Amino acid sequence: MAAMPQFDVVAEVIALQKRFVQAQEFGAARPLDIDRIMDFYAPDCVLWDVVTPLQFAGAQAIRGNVEELFGSLRSLSIKLRDLAVHGDRQLAIARCILELTAVGPRGRTARMTCRITDCWQKENGRWRIIHEHASMPGDLRSGLIEFNAC
Amino acid sequence: MAAMPQFDVVAEVIALQKRFVQAQEFGAARPLDIDRIMDFYAPDCVLWDVVTPLQFAGAQAIRGNVEELFGSLRSLSIKLRDLAVHGDRQLAIARCILELTAVGPRGRTARMTCRITDCWQKENGRWRIIHEHASMPGDLRSGLIEFNAC
């Protein structure tokens, strides 16, 4: 028989996931705060991002990627949708779709729809992300990323 | 304090993940067996695959995608590497890298390196995949998928 669902964990991780996504937004009114973003990742987190390389292993590599991706942008706003969380005592899985609107250094706006799977683990009473998988699907024949798949 | 690690769950899911990957291999010596593959997915599993659309929700949609992707191939062989599993009582996360070698209908060989995150849930004593995220990273400037990222 399955163990009882962990409703408290699910509610807690839903709130955490929303805060984590909000922490990534920035613009004229609120500057980019990389420390705040990094606070959600475990030190040994493995990130598989939309961009190469294949993986970013550990907080230092993840921070470098955040700096590289976000550092040159004027602003990033995010619409979170389809958030679903499964939780156990010390492990939880959150998946969501992010609709990103990024304004580049020369004022050009880019939109993309990303799929995010965040794996949260509770250690010493604190939930952090131990594995993140972010991607966009593509077309294997043309070899092109589909930036706005639906 | 964190709950005790679930060593038995981790060992069980490592074995399941390996069997699940093996079930996807086929060729002259062993025909494609879609029922065997589908047996690992929960009925309400949500798959985010390397190909569009954004998601495949439910076993029927996932089966359609497996038929579409694998049905025209002569063979598919898979090298699994970097398997890591985190487990709790009724929830486990498996991530691994798959090096796929596919031979197409006209005998052309294609190789790609995919990142797989499988979320397993135990229900009625049985582990099944409730969410799978498969992807390859890309280059946001060129818009191209990186089929063989490292």
Image (cartoon, coloured by chain):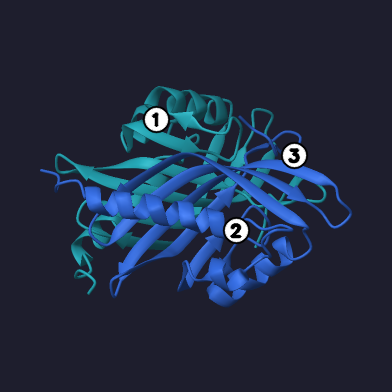
Chain colours: A blue, B cyan
Which subunit holds the residue at mark 3?
A
The residue lying at 22 percent from left, 66 percent from top is: B7
Camera sees residue A83: yes
Residue B127, image x, y percentages: 24, 44
Give me the disc on residue A24: 2
- Report the quarter where the N terminus of chain B lies: bottom left
Give the x, y percent position of residue B54.
57, 33
- What amino acid type is highlighted by mark number 1? Asp
The extreme front residue here reads: A29
Q: Which is more N-terminal, label 2 or label 3? A: 2
Chain designation of label 1: B
Residue B29 in sight from this viewpoint = no
Work out whether B68 lies above or below A30.
Answer: above
- As measured in the structure, the alpha-carbon distance from the residue carrying label 3 to the one carrying label 2 is 26 Å
Q: In the rendered image, which residue does mark 1 sit on? A: B33
Mark 3 and mark 2 residues within 8 Å of each other at the beta carbon: no
Nearer to us of marks 3 and 1 is: 3
User: Where is residue A127 shown, x and y percent of the image?
Assistant: 36, 65
